Amino acid sequence: MCRCLRCPRANSPSVSAHYQLMKKLFALLKADYRNGRDSYWRTFAIVSTFFTGLFAFFCGVCLFYPQDIKPWPVVFYGLLSVVCLYVAVSTWRKWGLMRRIESCSHDFREVVEKSLYCDKCKVHKAIAQDGDTAGITNERLMHMRQVGRVCAKAAKELFGYSQQECQQMFIMGFLHDIGYEFVENQSDHNRVGGELLKQAGYVHAEPIVSHGDPTADFTDERVLLINYADMSVDSSGKFVGFSTRLKDIASRYGSESPQYITSAKVVSAVQDQLVKLRSE
């Protein structure tokens, strides 16, 4: 009975595949250890599994090759070898992938394209290609979050809202620009976003529909809060006040643009209502 991997039997597809798999795993272990990325317990578990598969491989191929012996030992050791080697390789790959993701400083698209998703999957490729081109950009998301925070804080200071009511105002402020995700014409974002929220049964959808409209009813506390916050937070999510906010809009759209003119009217309406509140 031959016990040498150099014999002709070792050139069979199954033996060759096992050998290449073990060789690849050993190279991965060696390279990762040299790079100083080893974790003792993970390395021990993977190496133990690897050598278990290696032992099963030698037992199945070299000791119990089916010549004059029942085939069940070969089947048993062969299956054990395949399972152990597969577990070792897949565990190592997953570990390496998680370490790459944790240390990755790239943007969403690059992480998706290079680390997470299969290139053959059309859905994942579409996400990778369009992940950062949606209507709500990261910068706008910061603006929405800060508007929500200003709404909550102003609700407490101006109207004495309870904590639960302030939380509702934060949600309203956070959702005020949700319509940007679904429109091509940006001037429709308030109407589209508000109508979608109405369809979902959101109780504060009406102020979202009318935000940015200088003809809205600013005596409605929610309308005042959402416009006050929106006109106080710049496009990057910083609380800057009315004048700086208007300068920000002018720098992006121009001082003669409809966006700037409308925003200036909204600021004027908010200021008038705040003066009335102080005089009461």
Image (tube, helix red, strand yellow):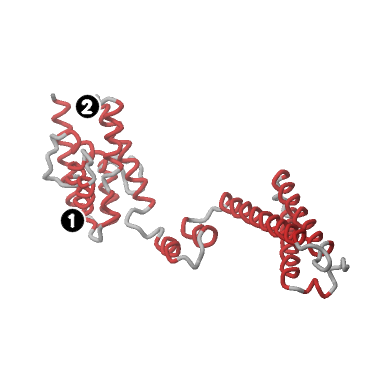
State the image coordinates of residue 254 (x, y, percent, origin top left).
24, 57
Q: Quadrant of the N terminus?
A: bottom right
Horizontal side, residue 228 vs residue 146: left or right: left
Which numbered mark, 2 or 1, is in the foreground of this view?
Answer: 2
Which callout, 2 or 1, points at the residue further toward the start of the chain? 2
Q: Which residue is mark 2?
A: 159
Q: Which residue is mark 1?
A: 258
Q: Secondary structure at mark 1?
A: helix
Near-viewer residue (49 or 161)? 49
State the image coordinates of residue 119 (x, y, percent, origin top left).
50, 66
Near-viewer residue (264 or 105)? 105
Near-viewer residue (211 or 232)? 211
Q: Residues within 10 Å of mark 2 (few under 14, many from 20)?
A: few
State the image coordinates of residue 190 (x, y, percent, origin top left).
21, 50
Q: Quadrant of the C terminus?
A: top left
Q: Are marks 2 and 1 in contact (CB under 8 Å)?
A: no
**Residue 62 sits in quarter:** bottom right
State the image coordinates of residue 175 (x, y, percent, origin top left).
28, 44
Q: Does 232 appear above or below 280?
A: below
